[in-house]
Image (tube, rainbow, N blue to C red):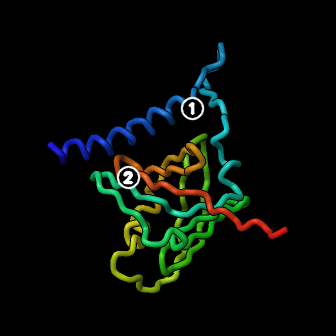
């Protein structure tokens, strides 16, 4: 019974995230026009451009949760020009990103250094999941990135820059 409660605890947030995305992306059809129009809210590409995040938690599709040993070793910076910079444990990379519709997110191929990361690293999992990213939502200041199907959800927190001393 404990196992089913644990799975329910993971499935419920995934279900809620899916519902939240659906609610936040209302689609209407103008009278006489059959082209769907998406209302852009506050969760569009411009909100990701210029932001930087560090991995807080990975909620895998199988119900397991992983927390990085050091959040600063798993970062992503969305640049204004559609490029991105990433640090995935002991490797650094550069790639592309786009948001073709509100709450949609797609990553292009990632050019990544090839250092061998230590045991327990989330490197291999993140690299495997990279091009399976499909949706995002920003909730309570956290970035939730979901994978195609029920592959899981990556939860990122913003990277806070140090305030200058006065």
Is the residue 157 above or below the residue 41 in the image? below
Q: Which circle, 2 or 1, is nearer the viewer?
A: 2
| Residue marked by disc 1 | 25
Of all residues shown, which one is farthest toward the right?
A: 166
User: Are discs 2 and 1 less than 8 Å apart at CB?
Assistant: no
Residue 46 coordinates in the image, percent (x, y):
71, 48
Relative side of 1 to 127, left or right: left
Residue at x 46%, y 86% (from the top left corner): 115
| Residue marked by disc 2 | 152
Badge 2 density bin: few <14, some 14–19, many ≥20, Cα 10 Å: many
Badge 1 density bin: few <14, some 14–19, many ≥20, Cα 10 Å: some
Residue at x 45%, y 49% (from the top left corner): 146
Of all residues shown, which one is farthest toward the top?
A: 31
Mark 2 / mark 1, whichever is N-terminal: 1
Which element type, helix, strand or loop, lies under badge 1? loop
Is the residue 37 above or below the residue 71 in the image? above
């Amino acid at each position: 019974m404990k196992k089913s409660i644990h799975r329910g605890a993971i499935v419920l947030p995934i279900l809620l995230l899916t519902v939240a995305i659906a609610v936040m992306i209302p689609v209407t059809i103008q009278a006489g026009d059959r082209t769907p129009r998406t209302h852009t809210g506050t969760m569009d590409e411009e909100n990701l451009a210029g932001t930087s995040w560090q991995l807080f938690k990975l909620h895998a599709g199988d119900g397991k949760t992983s927390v990085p040993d050091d959040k600063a070793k798993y970062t992503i910076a969305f640049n204004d020009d559609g490029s991105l910079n990433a640090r995935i444990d002991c490797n650094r990379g550069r790639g592309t990103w786009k948001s073709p519709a509100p709450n949609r997110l797609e990553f292009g191929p990632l050019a990544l250094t090839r250092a061998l990361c230590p045991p327990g690293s989330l490197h291999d999992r993140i690299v495997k999941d990279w091009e399976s990213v499909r949706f995002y939502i920003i909730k309570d200041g956290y970035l939730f990135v979901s994978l195609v199907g029920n592959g899981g959800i990556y939860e990122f927190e913003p990277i806070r820059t140090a305030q200058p001393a006065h």
